[in-house]
Amino acid sequence: MKVGLEVHQQIATGKLFCACPSELVEEEGATFVRRLRSASGEDRYVDAAAAFQASRGLSYRYTDGPSSCLVECDEEPPRPLNETALDVALTMALLLESRPVDEIEVMRKIVVDGSNTSGFQRTALIAVGGRLEVGGTTHEILSICLEEDAARKVGGDRSEVAFRLDRLGIPLVEIATGPTITSGAEAREVALEIGALLRSTRRVRRGIGTIREDLNVSIEGGHRIEIKGVQELRLLGEYVAREERRQQLLLGWREELRARGARVDPTVIDVGAELTGATQGPVASALHGGGVALALRLPGFAGLLSTPASTDERLGRELADHARAAGVGGIVHSDETTAAALAGGVADRLRDALKLDAHDAFVLVADRSEAKVRRALAAVAKRAQAALEGVPGETRDPLPDGRSRYSRPLPGRDRLYPETDVPPIPVSPERLARLRASLPERPAASRARLAREHGLAPELVRQIVYGGELDRFDELVERGRSAGAVARLLIQELPAVPPRPDGPPFEPSVELLDGLLRATESGAFSKEGIPAVLAELAAGRTTVDDAVHRAGLHRAGADELARVVEQVVGQQIELVRQRGEAAFSPLMGDVMRQLRGRRDGREIADELRRAIARRLAEPSH
Amino acid sequence: MTSEGTSPDPWEVLRTLPLGQRVELTDEQGTTWSGTVLPSHELSGPRVLTLKLETGYNVGIRIGPQVRYRRLGGPPAPAEVVTARPSGPPTGAGAIELLTTGGTIASRVDYETGGVRPIAGQDELLDFYPELRAEGTVRITPVLDVLSENLTPPDWLTLAGKAVEAFGRGAQGVVITHGTDTMGFTSAALSFLLVDLPGPVVLVGAQRSPDRPSSDGPSNLHAAARLARDRRIGEVVVVMHEGLSDDRFAVHRGTWVRKMHSTRRDAFVSRNGPPLGSIDANEIHLGPWVRPPASGPARLDGPLDARGALLSFYPGLPASRARQFAEGHRGIVLAGTGLGHVATEHLGWIREATARGVVVAMTTQCLEGIVDPFVYATGRELLRAGVTYLDDLLPETAYVKLLWALGHASSPDAVRELLLRDRAGEFLRRRTAGVPP
């Protein structure tokens, strides 16, 4: 298996071609509706991926806001390229020993799925070649690009897709490796290393969705499959493993289909009459809505659309994904013996009408639009034909469970043509010399420094450096906070804050975290209370003080401590008399229930021991 | 790799390779690049060769004296060819005629120079705008091929003549594709030059070039073609985006419209009032003042006398310069401040000019609103100096009308009378506080 990785990291320098901030916002502004159509590239050929998207004839609804301007609305030409973002990309080139180009040419990559208002993504090749050492293996770097992120999809249906413009134009550094990775685990390690290297520039955005990976996977005898936009790094290995398995299955099915002499009959047959009795399910509702039901014969495919039971992968699902991408809700096929549409003898009637024998399969599509049905069946026929060839190259979307789903054909080189509104940008030797003189600390050096200067355990150091927390760690330590407390906060306590059901994720500023740690240092509340205070901050408290009070964790004064301890000891006086000092443990539990997080545990224990000792010293009656 | 050829300087060879030649370079750092030679960008640095790499990216590589190179075979095979064609036959209705003049709407990116070049002829235009044929027959007549900033008054006459010919051939309406920069001038000129129109003359342009998927050209042109078939209109109008959306278009009277933004799709705005109408996906909505079609035949009512000028007053404009500027002209439109004022030091040359028969007319550089000489003393003095106040005409419309009036009258009084008489619905006469009147 060969795996290549493309890492896309958002850069926190303001947008790439305008003066907007590179921040996502919830506030909404004006709305407008557009359509896109594929335009010819420079060779006057239409790219297959672009033509596919344009053929779907969708409208796109865009909403602007405080993070977008006329440039994102495609109402103003791009402004000059953000020089700081370019410095980040060039710094990556130097760190990866890549060769920067001498003059950068900004290109337009045709993307007509609406995610770019212009119908293209601006992208520039910054450097080629390079190498990255991970775990003793040297991986090849193919290219480093600087490009615009796309608009955020926020909703839509089959005729209109809604986007917010805040993300559009945020700079992305794209780093592509060669196909030198051989396993899912290795892919994850390489991604972590590239991520840490990117973060070492200290100019990257943090949080969910700010770094995304594309995977290119192929096995012997298979074809390159691009799984695009993986956000969950922990699933990277899973996507690779499942894709390997899927391609193996496809190759196995190919052998079986060839052995059977299976073929695809492209003739589309109207089977509406056979389905008139159907009363339930999408097929029935399409027919009752004045739609059509058409079918396709797949001689020799019977039984192969639903095997094998041991995996999630089915040839039938592959066909259905292609049909859905062509605009219908799904398909019904002859291996689905439990499908509602085929119940009550319908399956047999269909088989008769389609003149199928036991080895033959059929695929049925119903929709109110006959054009959509025909388009979907054409896509199914094409995919079924490809099954006879093995693994069709395609772009797939990652699903949350580690599987992936067909999204569109692989894009070709014709998608790129020059962005004539931006002049070429020279990369001067002076600029490279300046960047070379101030290269950031590499991840390995950071790990050594953290272990050396702060005595932190290797695993903790690893989590700080590869978990993207190094910049905050350094900043908090520089502000005078203790390294241990900072590490615990960033690696254990912050990730444990429960996610908010709605609203933006909790992203506390360094100032706030500094204030939190200062408050525990000054004794405003005890460090055991940090999780509770964080939960309050996540729930919207704006100051540490407020959060501490809301959590009921303001430090208990000496009076309150003495009062609670006396009260507990008084209530359990029999126990104290019976068990003497051994009563400490059960009583400590009672006291802590009232004072946890509001006073250091050791101070509470001391107070309790003193109180027990006092009672035991009293003359008994 | 060995260096081909005998030239000691690889740059001298590489710069002269034919476009599309594939080469492999090894630069002085030992990196190998293979791709197709493109012409260097006009803003490229010295000795920079532009290559299109196999990945599709263009890059600039500095060709030092040690660079080695090798010619490779022909261009890489293109990806799968997909030609998008509209489905279904034309749906009938009457023929319209499309006159092309150049501009963004009729241009595409030239990948050889990186600039914008005109669309070459009927086939390419229909290729780009398949929606043109969606509603019926379209005859395409190329008239001019210029960016609109290069158009001159004689071009307006040429265009008007072609429009008359089109109606003479039985066209139900005429669409003119036009660069947006001076489309307002041309629409005003055609408004004055064309009389007895039996159908609409629709000017249309694009603010985004048609080679981008998001171009407003296709939807504007489609809306213009629909309007050109509307039998309720007998005047010159401009059709462009009403807002930022691709599903609504405004219909502007040719004499009221002005480009008010350098880049936005909805740059064209009717001054002093709402547009004549709007077009959405289903319908064409027209307001009450649309001029109905005449029974024809359409006529060209020339000529234009180019001895008219437009001068925008600004604080600090020396009266001596304005006096020089007025020389040799039969008429001058001033774009004055506010209600129609210029600095009082200009009264001298204005008095001299009007005394020798030069028509001096006043408009406002505010663009919205009227000029009125009676409100301030300066206005009253300008009026006494012989200045003609043109109510709510846009300065550009007033300038175009001046050329037309100069072409149709010899005495200054007669010119002034023509200027003040409504000819093409150019005076709005009544302006309201927001709601359409």
Image (cartoon, rainbow, N blue to C red):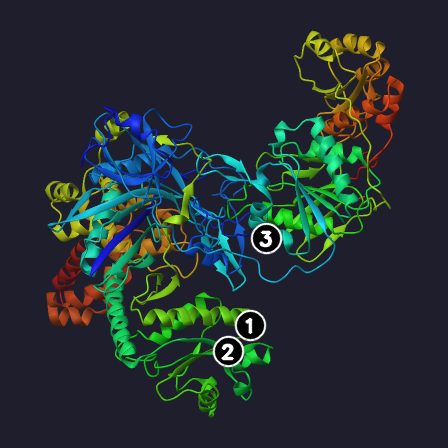
Tag 1 secondary structure: helix
Q: Which amino acid does label 1 sit on?
A: Glu
Q: How far apart are marks 3 and 1 (CA)?
A: 23 Å
State if disc 1 and disc 2 touch (CB < 8 Å).
Answer: yes
Q: Which amino acid does label 2 sit on?
A: Leu
State if disc 1 and disc 3 touch (CB < 8 Å).
Answer: no
Q: Distance between the residues labelled 2 and 1?
A: 9 Å
Q: Which of B54 and A116 is in front in this view?
A: B54
Q: Name the residue under label 1.
A: A370
Q: Where is residue A307 in the image (x, y as percent from the top left)?
A: 30, 80
Q: Mark 2 points at which residue?
A: A294
Q: Position of residue A518 (x, y in %)?
A: 27, 43
Q: Nearer the viewer, residue B13 or A489?
A: B13
| Residue B72 relative to residue A323: left or right | left
Q: Residue at x 44, y 91 (%)?
A: A348
Subunit under mark 2: A
Residue A486 visible, this orientation? no
Q: How many labels does the image show?
A: 3
Q: Distance between the residues labelled 2 and 3?
A: 30 Å
Crowdedness near tag 1: few (<14), some (14–19) or many (≥20) residues, C-alpha within 10 Å = some
**Both marks 2 and 3 on one chain:** no
State if disc 3 and disc 2 touch (CB < 8 Å).
Answer: no
Residue A274 visible, this orientation? yes
Sequence-wise, the earlier of marks 2 and 1 is: 2
Q: Mark 3 points at which residue?
A: B130
Q: Which amino acid does label 3 sit on?
A: Pro
